[in-house]
């Protein structure tokens, strides 16, 4: 059985759940009199995703005028969504849509299958990321390196300054320095 590529519709666990909920709603109405698939897709997903969904149906040779064919295909999609692995990623910034696309493409290229991203934001990691996938965890953030440098710099607690100056305090103190020739 050929796997469905659903990467045009979602990249994250939250987006997949939302997509699945909307698909279930459409599925509930396919046996109603006057059901219009394109109108239902437009209402739930918008024009761009509607067109991609129609193309997905066409590529999978689904008869869009037969409710039982639609129902079977929708069930196949729901099963596919529930079987996608989840990659948990903690990063220090709020990603934009393009970031999700890049990460999803990288995952598909490197693990050779789709995976859903479960993104968490934690500014305390400073930069980089922590990753959890298939029971494995990797801390690729900057924080451990930063902590190690800090510990190496101040080997015992007596060397740690009582108050570290903030960037604003450092900037203000520089303004009061006069340079003479």
Image (cartoon, rainbow, N blue to C red):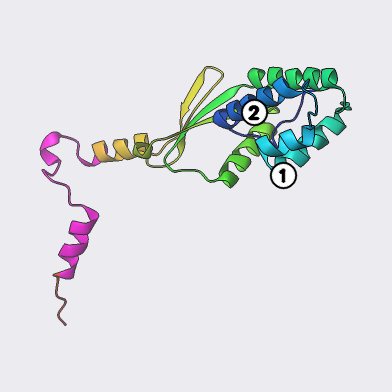
Look at mark 2 in the image and give the residue it sits on: 22
The Cα atoms of the two marked residues, 2 and 1, are separated by 15 Å
Question: What residue appears at the point 80 percent right and 24 percent down from the top-left corner?
Answer: 33
The label on residue 48 is 1
Residue 83 covered by magenta stretch: no
Task: Give percent across and percent down for residue 165.
Answer: 17, 52
Closer to the camera in the image, 70 or 32: 32
Q: Residue 180: x percent and y percent?
A: 14, 80
**Within-10-Å neighbours for mark 1: few <14, some 14–19, many 20+:** few
Camera-side residue: 129 or 18?
18
Quadrant for the C terminus in the image: bottom left
Residue 124: where, in percent of width, then height? 34, 37
Q: Which dot marks residue 130?
A: none
- Marks counted in the figure total 2
Give the image quarter of residue 97.
Answer: top right
Write down the quadrant of residue 29 in the picture. top right
Q: Residue furthest bottom?
A: 181
Question: Which mark is first along the chain, 1 or 2?
Answer: 2
- Picture layout, residue 158 above or below residue 64: below
**Position of residue 7 measured from the top left corner of the image (x, y, whole percent):** 69, 34
């Amino acid at each position: 059985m050929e796997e469905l590529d659903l990467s045009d519709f979602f990249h994250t666990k939250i987006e997949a759940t939302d997509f699945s909920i909307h698909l279930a709603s459409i599925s509930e109405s396919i046996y109603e009199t006057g059901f219009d698939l394109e109108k239902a897709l437009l209402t739930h997903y918008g024009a761009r995703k509607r067109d991609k969904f129609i193309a997905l149906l066409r590529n999978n040779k689904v008869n869009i005028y037969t409710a039982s064919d639609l129902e079977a295909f929708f069930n196949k999609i729901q099963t596919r969504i529930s079987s996608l692995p989840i990659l948990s990623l903690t990063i220090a910034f709020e990603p934009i849509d393009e970031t999700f696309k890049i990460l999803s493409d990288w995952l598909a290229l490197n693990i050779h299958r789709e995976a859903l991203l479960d993104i968490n934001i934690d500014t305390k990691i400073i930069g980089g990321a922590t990753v959890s996938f298939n029971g494995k965890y990797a801390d690729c953030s900057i924080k451990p390196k930063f902590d190690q440098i800090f510990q190496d710099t101040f080997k015992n607690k007596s060397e740690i300054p009582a108050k570290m100056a903030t960037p604003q305090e450092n900037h203000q103190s520089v303004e009061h320095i006069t340079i003479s020739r």
